[in-house]
Image (spheres, rainbow, N blue to C red):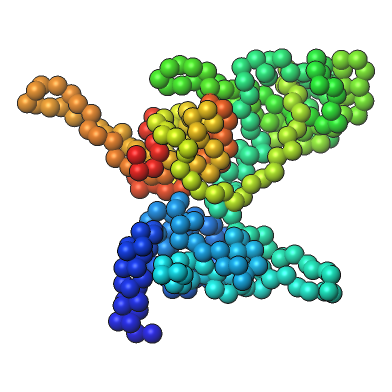
Amino acid sequence: MSKTVRYLITAFFLMLSTISHSLTLKPDAPERYTVQKGDTLWGIAERYTDDAWQWPNIWYQNTQVADPHLIYPGDIIGLMMIGGEVKVTVVKRGTESRTVKLSPTARIEPIESAIPTIPVDAILPFVVSNRIVKPGELESAPYILSAGGGRIMNGAGGVAYGRGDFKDGIANAYGIFRASKLYRDPVTEEVLGLEAMEVGLANVVSNEKDMVKLDLVKTSQQVKEGDRLLTTENRKIVARFQPKAPDQDVDGFIISVPGGVTQIGQYSMIVINKGTRDGVTEGSILDIMKRGEVVKDRTRKEEVRLPAEKGGQLMVFRAYEKLSYALVVKATRALNVGDQVTSPFK
C-alpha cells in the first residue's frame, strides 16, 4: 500500500471517528498490530489513542471471535469500520489463544494467559504483601510470643509460637505482619489507615487455649517477637482492570511513594488520599496535576502560585475505604508527593 493511500485511509477513519463522536485515533495508529508477549492493554491502547483509559470506547468485541474481551500474544488487532464508526478489534486470533478440540466434549485452554491491563510485576508486591488496616486492628491481633528455641527471631523453615485473642477461632494459616506506615490526610490530618507489611506466612501445627505453634513456611524478613498474626486473604491477583472515571468528582493528593523513592515516573507505585468512600474503586483513572511553581508578582509585590498543569494519569489497582494504591500509567513530567489528583477532564 502506498503512503498516499495509507494517508487517505487514515484521514478517512479519523474524519468518521470525529463525526460519530467516538474517541479520536492517532494519525499514525497502525492498521494492524500483532500482540507480543510482555504487552499490556494500556500500552496497546496508547498506540491508537492519546486517551488510553477510554480504550473501551473504540474496542469492538467481535462475537465471532472466542473470548473477544481478552487479547493474547500472537493475536492481530486492527482498524475496522463497524456501524459507520472506526473501531479496533481482533481481526485474527493467534495460536496462543485458540482452543484445540481433543474430542467432541474436551478442550484444552490457551497456553498463554491473556495480556494484562497494566504491568503485573509493578503491582504484585502491593497486591500480595501489603494491606491497609484500621487503627487498633493490628495492635489487637494475636502476636508472635517466641521465635522458637528460645530465640527472639527466626526465618523460613523454623518454628514460632503465637498468642492472643483468636476472636474468630484458630485458622489453618496466618500471615505475619509488621506495622509499616501510618497514613494521614495532608489537609485534614485524619488517619486514613495503617500499612501492614507482610514479613512471613505460617501454618498452624497445633494449638492450646490462646497459643498456637507455627511452622514458618515463607519469610521475607526475620520473624521476631511482637509481629502480628492476621488471617491470610484469599486474594485473587487481578491482572485485567476496566478503566473508568470515578463515580463522583475526586480532588485529592499523592501522599506517599512506597520504597522511599522521591521521583515519580511511569509505572511508579503511589498512594493517594482517596478511597471507596470518595467513589474511587479498582480501575479508576485520575489525572495527576503538577503543582505550579511559586513566582513573585513584582507589580503587586506578592508571591503567587501558577495554575496546576496535567502531568500524567494513574490507575487505582487496590482501593480501601479512605485511601488507595495506584500505578502511574502515564507521566509527561517528573511528579512528586503532594501533586494533586482529580477526575479526568475535570
Furthest-bottom residue in this view: 1
Residue 172 appears anywhere in the view: yes
Q: In the rendered view, tell whether residue 53 sits above or below residue 75.
A: above
Q: Nearer the viewer, residue 8 or 263?
A: 8
Q: Residue at x 67, y 18 (%)?
A: 137
Q: Nearer the viewer, residue 23 or 301?
A: 23
Q: Residue at x 54, y 57 (%)?
A: 40
Q: In the rendered view, tell whether residue 32 sits above or below residue 290.
A: below
Task: Using residue 166 as the reference point, say whether residue 240 is left or right of it.
Answer: left
Furthest-left residue in this view: 299
Quadrant in which the C terminus is drawn? top left
Q: In the rendered view, tell whether residue 208 sits above or below residue 48.
A: above
Furthest-front residue in this view: 83
**Can you tell which quarter of the image residue 138 is in?**
top right
At which x and y percent is residue 206? Answer: 92, 25
Q: In the rendered view, tell whether residue 316 sits above or below residue 61.
A: above
**Can you tell which quarter of the image residue 312 is in?**
top left
Task: Using residue 325 as the reference point, say whether residue 127 is left or right of it.
Answer: right
Q: Residue at x 30, y 81 (%)?
A: 4
Task: Using residue 71 as the reference point, say whether residue 83 is left or right of it.
Answer: left
At which x and y percent is residue 233? Answer: 73, 34
Q: Residue at x 39, y 42 (%)?
A: 344
At which x and y percent is residue 192? Answer: 53, 22
Residue 260 appears anywhere in the view: no
